[in-house]
Amino acid sequence: MTSERQSSHRRSLALAGLAATALVVLLATAALADSPAPGSPAPGSPQAGASGPPSGGSNAISIVQKTFQPSTLTVHVGDTVTWTVTEAISDPHSVTSGTYKDAASSGKDFDSGVKLKNNGDSFSHTFDAAGTFAFFCAVHPDTMSGTITVVDASGSAGGEAGGGIPVESKLLAAGILVVVLVLLFGWASVYRRMNPGH
Ligand SMILES: [Cu+2]
């Protein structure tokens, strides 16, 4: 009986130690999440303006007669895409998000309206979230449709849940989970000690 009680006591001490360790890890994780990573580049780092056009410059789609060129484009979260008429025809065009005749998606994210007619007429949309965004021309949906793929900094298009959650938040969540589990096991141990029959 005595050795059993001592062993139980030792186990409780071990659990308390585990809980304390987990708490320290949690606090360290929280501190890490609050402070910016020392290695992260400062905004406006030299290479941004050193060579080539700004990153937004390539996010252009031309409306050439009854086509979008290119019809597919991959950009980053926060980028602006500009559609511009470069070879006008007698019909006007639109840049409308979603799928033609699909009321649930059509024009939900963006819609220029049917007013892109003359060379130089343009429409811009800034993509604030990762994902895949279809678009079409409401006047010529048969030949004019396309897709913008918007990726976050890690290159993910956010297809699966949690794709946009920063690593720090994931670490914090893991830390909280560890503490909760350790506390649960600790309480289970205490309960067993108070109810030796079970
Ligand atoms: Cu069109």
Image (cartoon, helix red, strand yellow):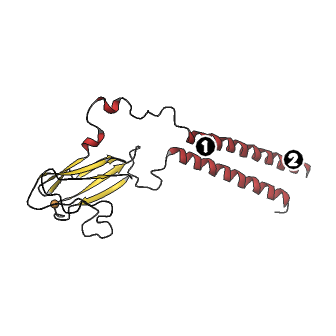
Disc 1 to disc 2: CB gap under 8 Å: no
How packed mark 2 is, by other alpha carbons closer than 10 Å (few <14, some 14-19, many 20 or more), is few
Mark 1 or 2 closer to N-term? 2
Q: Amino acid at mark 1?
A: Ala
Q: Which residue is mark 1?
A: 30
Q: Name the foreground residue: 61 vs 74.
A: 61
Q: Residue at x 29, y 66 (%)?
A: 106
Disc number for residue 6:
2
Q: Name the foreground residue: 142 vs 2.
A: 142
x then y, percent, for residue 74: 30, 48
x then y, percent, for residue 168: 54, 44
| Total marks in image | 2
Quadrant observed for ligand 1 in the rendered image: bottom left
Q: Residue at x 58, y 47 (%)?
A: 172
Q: Amino acid at mark 2?
A: Gln
Left/right of residue 77 with respect to residue 123 in the rendered view: right
